[in-house]
C-alpha cells in the first residue's frame, strides 16, 4: 500500500465495482487465461495494463478478447524514465541540432530498449533491422528509421554499468563522462544526485535540475528497505512507473500511453528478427506498416 495501490493474487480480495484500473503483472503465458477471466467477470469497462511483451505470438487469438476492453495499454515505464525524459527535452530544444544516431551500450533490453528509442524519435515503425550475433546472448541490433536516423542496441544488458549516447548534428547527450577537450561540440551529461545510495535529484552537466512535484513525492516516499535490490536502475524504474501512471490518470498521455498493439508490434519485430537476423518493412517508406493492420484484423476475428 506504499502508493495507495492494493495488490492481490485473488479476485475475491477486491470489490470489483470499485476498481478503475487493472494492472497485470504475471508470466506472459498466463495472460490469455487471466484476460478471459476478467472478461467473464464483466470488467471490460476497466482500463487494463499488460506487461511487455503483452502476448506470446502463439496466443494472438486472445487479441479478440483483449479488444473488447475499453482501453488496453502496455505497461512500459522505460519511455518515461527521468533520464530519457530529460534527453527528450534537450532534443526538443534543438541544442544538439538534428538527431542522427542513438546507441544503447549494454543499457537496453529488447522490448524496453525498442520502446524507448521509438519514443525518443517519435516513430512507431522500423524500416530496417540488422542483427550481429557474437554469442548466445550477445547481440548488436541496428535499427533504421524513416528519414535516415539509426539506433543500436548492444547486448547483453547490464543496467548498472550500461550507458547511452545520443548524437545530433551539433552535439551529444550522454550519461557518462566524455573528454570534451577532444571535440568542440556541445555535450549534455545527464546524471543523479545520490545520498546513501538513494537518488535525491537529477542533474545536467553537474547542475541540479529543479524537481517536479512528482520528483519531490518520489524522493519523500521511496522506502529503500522495500526494494529487494535498491540499485539506481530500480529506483528510476519506480520513478518511471509513477510518471507513466500519472500521465495516464491525468489524461496527458497522448505521447506516452503505449497501446497494447505497439507492444505486440515490438514482440513481432523481435520474433522475426531473431529467426531471420534481419527485418525490412517496405511500407514504412510511406509512414505505414502492414504489421498493425494484421494485429487489428486478428483483434476483430471471432
Image (cartoon, grey):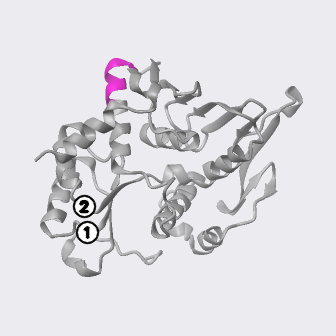
- Nearest the viewer among 263 and 97 is 97
In the rendered view, does 205 fall on the left or right side of 18?
right
Which percent across, then down, holds residue 132?
A: 47, 18
Residue 277 falls in image quadrant? top left
Residue pictured at 70% horizontal, 40% vertical: 174
In the rendered view, does 173 fall on the left or right side of 236?
right
Residue 261 falls in image quadrant? top left
- In the rendered image of this protein, does residue 153 appear above or below residue 95? above
Give the class, few, some or many, for how many residues have Cα within 10 Å of label 2's Cα (few <14, many ≥20).
some
Q: Which residues are magenta?
A: 271-278
Does residue 137 appear in the picture of this structure?
Answer: no
- Nearest the viewer among 27 and 86 is 86
Residue pictured at 89% horizontal, 30% vertical: 181
Q: CA distance from mark 1 to mark 2?
A: 6 Å
Residue 23 falls in image quadrant? bottom left
Which percent across, then down, holds residue 214?
A: 61, 69
* Number of disc labels: 2
Reading the image, the residue beneath label 1 is 45
Reading the image, the residue beneath label 2 is 69
Residue pictured at 79% horizontal, 38% vertical: 187
Q: Secondary structure at mark 2?
A: loop
Q: Are marks 1 and 2 in contact (CB under 8 Å)?
A: yes
- In the rendered image of this protein, does residue 254 appear above or below residue 93? below
Residue farthest to the front? 286
Amino acid at each position: 500500500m506504499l502508493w495507495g495501490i492494493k495488490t492481490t493474487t485473488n479476485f475475491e480480495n477486491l470489490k470489483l465495482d470499485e476498481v478503475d484500473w487493472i494492472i497485470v503483472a504475471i508470466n506472459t503465458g498466463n495472460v490469455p487465461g487471466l484476460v478471459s477471466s476478467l472478461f467473464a467477470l464483466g470488467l471490460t469497462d476497466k482500463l487494463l495494463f499488460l506487461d511487455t511483451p503483452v502476448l506470446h505470438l502463439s496466443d494472438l487469438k486472445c487479441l479478440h478478447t483483449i479488444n473488447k476492453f475499453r482501453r488496453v495499454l502496455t505497461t512500459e515505464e522505460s519511455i518515461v524514465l527521468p533520464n530519457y525524459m530529460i534527453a527528450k527535452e534537450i532534443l526538443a530544444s534543438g541544442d544538439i541540432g538534428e538527431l542522427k544516431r542513438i546507441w544503447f551500450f549494454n543499457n537496453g533490453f529488447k522490448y524496453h530498449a525498442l520502446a524507448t528509442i521509438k519514443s525518443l524519435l517519435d516513430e512507431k515503425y522500423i524500416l530496417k533491422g540488422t542483427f550481429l550475433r557474437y554469442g548466445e546472448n550477445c547481440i548488436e541490433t541496428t535499427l533504421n528509421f524513416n528519414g535516415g536516423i539509426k539506433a543500436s542496441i548492444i547486448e547483453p544488458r547490464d543496467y548498472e554499468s550500461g550507458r547511452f549516447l545520443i548524437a545530433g548534428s551539433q552535439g551529444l547527450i550522454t550519461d557518462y563522462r566524455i573528454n570534451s577537450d577532444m571535440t568542440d561540440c556541445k555535450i549534455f551529461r545527464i546524471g543523479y544526485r545520490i545520498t546513501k545510495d538513494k537518488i535525491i535529484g537529477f542533474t545536467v552537466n553537474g547542475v541540479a535540475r529543479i524537481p517536479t512535484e512528482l520528483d519531490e513525492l518520489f524522493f519523500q516516499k521511496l522506502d529503500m528497505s522495500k526494494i529487494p535490490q535498491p540499485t539506481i536502475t530500480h529506483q528510476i524504474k519506480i520513478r518511471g512507473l509513477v510518471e507513466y501512471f500519472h500521465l495516464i490518470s491525468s489524461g496527458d498521455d497522448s505521447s506516452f500511453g503505449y497501446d497494447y498493439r505497439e507492444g505486440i508490434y515490438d514482440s513481432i519485430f523481435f520474433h522475426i528478427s531473431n529467426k531471420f537476423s534481419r527485418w525490412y518493412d517496405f511500407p514504412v517508406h510511406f509512414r505505414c506498416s502492414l504489421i498493425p493492420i494484421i494485429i487489428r484484423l486478428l483483434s476483430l476475428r471471432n
